[in-house]
Amino acid sequence: MKIAILGAGVLGTQLARELIAEQRDVIVIEKNPDIARAVSNDLDCMVVEGDGERLETLQDAGIGEVEWFIACTGSDETNIVSCGMVSEAFGMKIGTIARTRNPYFASFPHKGKRILGVDHLVSPEAESAQAIARIIFRGMTPELIDVKEAGIQVRMRQAADLPGFVDKPLFEIRAEKGQDFMVPAVMRKGQLIVPSGEFVMEEDDLVYLLGEPAQLDRLFGPCTSALRRFRSILIFGAEPVTAVLLHELGLEESAASTRDRARNRAALSLLGNPVIKVIDGNRDHVKLIARSFPDIESIHRSLTEENLLEEEGAGEADIVLCLTSTQSLNLFLGMLANRAGAKRTLALMENDLYSSITDIINVDIMLNKKAIVSGAILDLVRKARIRRLYSFPQNEYELIEIQVRDNASTIGQKIKNMTLPRGSLITFVIHQGRTMIPTGDTVIEKNDLVGFIVPKARIGALESIFGA
């Protein structure tokens, strides 16, 4: 598969790096000569220096030979215009994706049809807000991993906290506990391991447990760190992501007629109907939140004031969300709120700059916007209906979900008889709405949702097997 990326900023570079890891043929187009030179030295792909809003540049880059054109510059207008030019010049044979930051596009009714030459509009704010909403509804616990799938759950636990795990091989643990769970990965001394049945657990291992929530509760107890009900949510930052999040929670009057928003509003009510306060130093942003969400307490105040957290009650808050446009400020506010006594804190990160020191950062959840958005785009360009559920630390392995197509060579086969890419592991099968933790005798059927933990470099091989 050949893919062109316009814009070598944080997102464009991340996408290129991930696609190269999957052994795709990538072309990067960048207007800034210094950035183009740096990317060319850093990435193993073709880099073209030029203006992506000029058809000659696109033609010189060989756009006519690609399957997907992804525009992710810092300008919404440039992204939409360049996608329109590609569509006009090459028709439907090239899929187009535009990254847009304007909140208007987050709810733009474009799904299923090409608008202004764009097949898919991807909003970092919308994708991030949806991820935050899921985390809120799942109890704001760092023990649970957001996998975007209701049928399964992934939890992180220390091996020392799991009775009967330490100093035992995995096959023996599963024989004793039963087959209703799986250990798709273990983190040992900073290294991610996909364990075999002979793998022996050590006390300091961080264990990933996968299964249906009810089965994980039965086997290992419920998540004691999850908030079941909460009274207050304090949000630092009245940025667009905050507006979209409040909309996702169903707190806008116009959202009541939308089924998903109405459901979320009902769910929030069951969690305690918390009082929500939004604070920001930008007066215009605060006014916009106040107009759109009259039931929310919107406060105009500098986020760097000395007594801000104490006077606004951060220490008494159940949930503190740090959603400004500055990731260092988010991290700083999250750490201070945690220290003040907030029950749960979340900091929105633009990239993975601080990922190597997460073990010493006192913030409950650090959410990487770049990883969220790149995952959403990868879901669109990958074949065989592949959807990323979770990207493991070090970014070498992914938990993905594949819907089995009519032409998949695996239909009717037992798992033990399949020839799967090296290093991949089937973690769950959802058949007609019922989730199964598979064994070697599990048979794959048409339309099943099959979960894998797989090295990025092997995803292309899975596409071929499951009906690209």
Image (cartoon, rainbow, N blue to C red):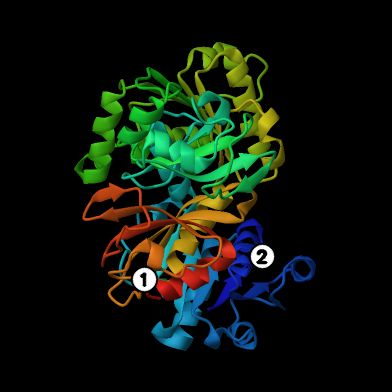
Query: Type of residue at label 2?
Result: Ala
State the image coordinates of residue 202 (x, y, percent, origin top left). 62, 33
Q: Going by the image, does 361 lie left or right of 66?
A: right
- Which of the 4 image quadrants contains residue 246? top left
Observer-nearest of 40 and 382: 382
Give the residue pinned by disc 1: 115
What residue lies at 63% left-to-right and 59% top-to-bottom? 14
Observer-nearest of 160 and 336: 160
Residue 8 tag number: 2
Measured Cα–Cα span from mark 2 to mark 1: 24 Å
What residue lies at 54% left-to-right and 13% top-to-bottom? 315
Q: Going by the image, does 70 lie left or right of 152?
A: right
Q: Alpha-carbon neighbours of circle 2 within 10 Å: few (<14), some, or many (≥20)?
A: many
Observer-nearest of 325 and 193: 193
What residue lies at 32% left-to-right and 44% top-to-bottom? 150
What residue lies at 38% left-to-right and 33% top-to-bottom? 138
- Indicate whether 125 appears above or below 39: above
Tell which circle, 2 or 1, labels the residue nearer the N-terminal end: 2
- Which of the 4 image quadrants contains residue 232? top left
State the image coordinates of residue 264 (x, y, percent, origin top left). 28, 36
Q: Alpha-carbon neighbours of circle 1 within 10 Å: few (<14), some, or many (≥20)?
A: some
Mark 1 residue element: loop
Judged by depth in the image, the label closer to the viewer, 2 or 1, is 2
Query: Type of residue at label 1?
Result: Ile
Q: Are marks 2 and 1 in contact (CB under 8 Å)?
A: no
- Indicate whether 151 appears above or below 293: below
